[in-house]
């Protein structure tokens, strides 16, 4: 059977664009449909604008530090409008780069919503139908908001990059990556930030000691955290949003941010009608090679809800391309994926948490928390945390967690060592870089705990 394309990709985000480009560069006929802007969540409403906001929010602290180092600097006023203009100029540039690079590789782009009409046919919003030998669904996810009266008075992360003005007082509900990162951003930009956290601690799933460390630092920096608390009533009052929490606390805020998780974009695109299976959370079920229950349809990235990170979506796209178009069956390697939360302070993490390591095998816990040179000089009380979990039996490093400035940059290289199977002895025989915070990773002497 003759098809219009060898591959039709739905979704122009991190995963979809990579798979489309690689396949087109191999000389295959490739099309891609994007209903919004090329670059997807990461570029347009995720990692990139978020990190630029993190940078913007960190300057006031840097200026205070500079004063202690003898500079007669003063922070002055933060101009949100000026920052927002520069931010969107940069996002436009990146969107354009994504689009041009894909087109240069030979990908034909349709700026329209697409849905699946049959196992080899995609229908675009204007009714046009295109056939393809393979269809790749890389449609990502979107924020979810609890179903309760007044919920529509809140914002979601997508809205934060378009605010007309910075809120003076903000409530963030949810304390995953997104809630905690934006709590730091707005706090740094002088918004009074409170958080409602359903569980006893922020950043569920991360190492408990690291979570506690970050929560303490966030509170010391002025963020109010209400744990064991979810909103039970929301109303528009006094020109703001009145929120009552399950702990009885009630307050009026200028802005309410729902940071209550994300959901795959699988509604209304014909997936189940053609036989693609979804799990109960709406994510597409795929095998080790990203193939769905329909052999011609594949899925990668946030829409399969495995590890919702940009580098993972990209690597899944690469694995799909190798498997389907290069005849090299390739599984995605999910071991030792490093990640960072751009909280303030930042955390870098790779491998097992202390809790996971303890459940797996007898573990030696190495950890140190200290005031780093740069801020201690200026009287800063905040400590950095370096932590390593080591197998008692094999001496292999099972996990590492760093909380402090530059943690994301440091953990990238720790991850290389762990991926190579490094032991604690390998770290110990590596000479330190001095004076640097990172030298702690090779000078952790005695375990602080032994978990049998
Ligand atoms: C606020 C925020 C901060 C983040 N920060 C980080 C970070 O610091 N580091 C990190 O690694 N990850 C981060 N992430 C996660 C990261 O953005 C995602 O994991 C990544 O973008 C997933 O890529 P994807 O290709 O699966 O989907 P996406 O990038 O979401 O792309 C999917 C695309 O499909 C389009 N689409 C959807 N339905 C259709 C349709 N029917 N037809 C046509 N097009 C459609 C969408 O418009 C979108 O452009 C962040 C996410 C958010 C929300
Ligand atoms: N730095 C990064 O790499 C980065 C940054 C942002 C997002 N991401 C990716 O995006 C994904 C989504 O992030 P997220 O923060 O939206 O989701 P999440 O699932 O990490 O956090 C959502 C939080 O909201 C809480 N919650 C849900 N409903 C609630 C309610 N009614 N009241 C109070 N709390 C409630 C949940 O218990 C959870 O702690 C992450 O899993 C991550 O993979 C990565």
Image (spheres, helix red, strand yellow):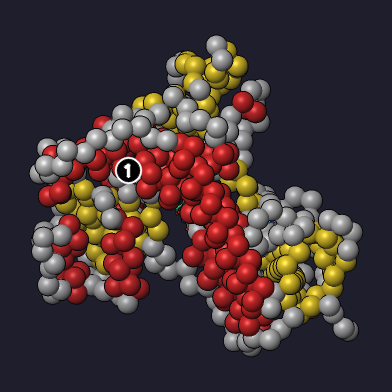
Horizontal and vertical percent position of residue 289:
62, 74
Image quarter in which the C terminus is found = bottom left
Tell me what residue is drawn at x 83 percent, y 60 percent.
Answer: 124
Q: Is residue 43 above or below residue 330?
A: above
Ligand 1: quadrant of the figure: bottom right
Horizontal and vertical percent position of residue 344:
33, 43
Quadrant of residue 401 within the rendered picture: bottom left
Q: Is residue 272 above or below residue 200?
A: below
- Relative side of 2 to 216, left or right: right
- Relative side of 329 to 428, left or right: right
Quadrant of residue 441 within the rendered picture: bottom left
Horizontal and vertical percent position of residue 104:
64, 76
Q: Nearer the viewer, residue 298 or 159?
A: 159
Other-residue count near label 1 (Cα within 10 Å), few / some / many at <14 / 14–19 / ≥20? some
Q: Nearer the viewer, residue 224 or 368?
A: 224
Q: Nearer the viewer, residue 365 or 384?
A: 384
Q: Residue furthest top?
A: 238
Q: Which residue is mark 1?
A: 58
Image quarter in which the N terminus is found = bottom right
Residue 162 visible in this rendered orientation of the protein? yes
- Relative side of 283 to 318, left or right: right
Q: Is residue 384 above or below residue 433?
A: above
Q: Secondary structure at mark 1?
A: helix
Tell me what residue is drawn at x 84 percent, y 73 percent.
Answer: 131
Tell me what residue is drawn at x 53 percent, y 39 percent.
Answer: 160
């Amino acid at each position: 059977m003759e098809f219009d394309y060898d591959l039709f990709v739905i979704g122009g985000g991190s995963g979809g664009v990579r798979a489309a480009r690689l396949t087109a560069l191999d000389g295959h006929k490739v099309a891609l449909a994007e209903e919004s802007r090329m670059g997807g969540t990461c570029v347009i409403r995720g990692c990139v604008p978020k990190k630029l906001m993190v940078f913007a929010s960190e300057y006031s602290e840097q200026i205070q530090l500079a004063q202690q180092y003898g500079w007669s600097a003063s922070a002055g006023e933060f101009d949100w409008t000026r920052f927002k203009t520069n931010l969107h100029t940069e996002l436009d540039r990146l969107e354009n780069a994504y689009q041009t690079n894909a087109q240069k590789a030979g990908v034909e782009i349709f700026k329209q919503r697409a849905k699946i009409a049959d196992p080899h046919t995609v229908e675009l919003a204007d009714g046009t139908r295109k056939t393809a030998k393979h269809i790749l669904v890389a449609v990502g996810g979107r924020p979810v908001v609890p179903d309760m009266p007044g919920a529509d008075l809140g914002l979601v992360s997508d809205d934060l990059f378009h605010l007309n003005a910075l809120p003076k007082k903000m409530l963030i509900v949810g304390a995953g990556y997104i809630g905690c990162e934006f709590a730091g951003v707005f706090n740094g930009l002088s918004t009074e930030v409170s958080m409602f956290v359903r569980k006893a601690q922020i950043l569920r799933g991360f190492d408990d000691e690291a979570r506690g460390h970050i929560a303490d630092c966030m509170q010391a920096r002025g963020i109010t955290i209400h744990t064991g608390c979810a909103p039970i009533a929301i109303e528009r009052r006094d020109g703001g949003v009145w929120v009552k929490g399950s702990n009885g606390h009630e307050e009026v805020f200028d802005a309410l941010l729902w940071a209550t998780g994300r959901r795959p974009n699988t509604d209304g695109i014909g997936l189940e009608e053609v036989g693609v299976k979804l799990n109960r959370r709406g994510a597409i079920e795929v095998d080790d090679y990203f193939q769905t229950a329909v052999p011609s349809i594949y899925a990668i990235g946030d829409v399969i809800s495995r590890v919702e990170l940009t580098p993972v979506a990209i690597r899944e796209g690469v694995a799909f391309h190798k498997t389907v178009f290069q005849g090299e069956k390739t599984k995605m390697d999910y071991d030792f994926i490093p990640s960072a939360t751009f909280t303030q302070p930042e955390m870098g993490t790779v491998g097992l948490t202390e809790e996971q390591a303890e459940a797996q095998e007898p573990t030696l816990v190495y950890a140190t928390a200290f005031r780093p040179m740069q801020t201690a000089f200026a009287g800063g009380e905040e400590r950095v945390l370096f932590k390593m979990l080591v197998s008692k039996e094999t001496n292999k490093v099972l996990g590492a967690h760093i909380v402090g400035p530059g943690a994301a940059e440091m953990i990238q290289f720790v991850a290389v060592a762990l991926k190579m199977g490094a032991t604690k002895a390998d770290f110990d025989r590596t000479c330190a870089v001095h004076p640097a915070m990172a030298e702690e990773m090779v000078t952790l002497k005695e375990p602080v705990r032994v978990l049998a």
